[in-house]
Image: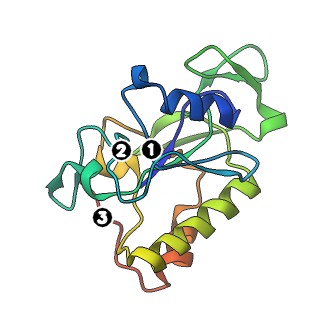
Amino acid sequence: MLHETAGRLDSAGSVAWLCNPAAKASAHLVIGRDGLITQLAPLNRATWHAGKSSYRGRAGVNAFSIGIELVGPGQMVAGTYGHARAWFGGEYAMAEYGIERVQTPEHGNGLWMPFTTAQIAATNAICKVLVAAYRLKDITTHWAIAPKRKVDPNPLFPLARCRELALGAKAAPMGRA
């Protein structure tokens, strides 16, 4: 299951937070903006990435999924002139980071930072490997298994392409709550 860290842009901070018991959240993998993949937990162990969730009617998604966190600031709002502001107060120049205003039924209306080419390539590669190695049947998102509660990863992630590369062109529709 794909997530977005909704934090600062450095992987080390996201990894440190997800390893901190105070976070009350964890994941199996973190993919930095440079494409570096950091494994935080064995893939056959439950981590606390999904929260209250359901996949195709089955509750408790943490127990049967692999959590992949993509480093990114999450949904942002307008900041000072030409900047977008994240929930933690960090501001990012919209032109420099390619930040876009996008509205979808699943994400609402917000400002979103695109994922990097390296991050997308690493995510596509790890999803393809995981599908092959573990015979996974689907790749889904936090917003799909916890609708109205979660909006990650953001709408700029090329989800259809990731699913096609990992699952094949004839993949079933993505599983949801």
Mark 2 and 1 residues: CB-CB less than 8 Å, in contact?
yes
Location of mark 1 (residue): 27
| Percent coordinates x, y for residue 117 in the rendering | 75, 57
> 10 Å neighbourhood of mark 3: few (<14), some, or many (≥20)?
some
Tell me if 91 is positioned left or right of 137 in this view. Answer: right
Earlier-in-chain disc, 3 versus 2: 2
- Closer-to-camera residue (129/33): 129
Picture residue at 76% right of the left edge, 48% below the top: 34
Residue kind at label 2, given as amino acid type? Thr
Which residue is located at x 53 percent, y 67 percent?
A: 127
Query: Residue 109 at what x, y percent from top left?
Result: 50, 35
* N-term mark: 3 or 1: 1
* Residue 145 position in % (x across, y down): 30, 50
Residue at image mark 2: 47
Camera-side mark, 3 or 1: 1
The amino acid marked with disc number 1 is: Ala
- How far separated are the C-alphas under marks 3 and 1? 20 Å
Q: Which residue is mark 3?
A: 175
Badge 2: few (under 14), some or many (20 or more) residues near its Cα, within 10 Å? many
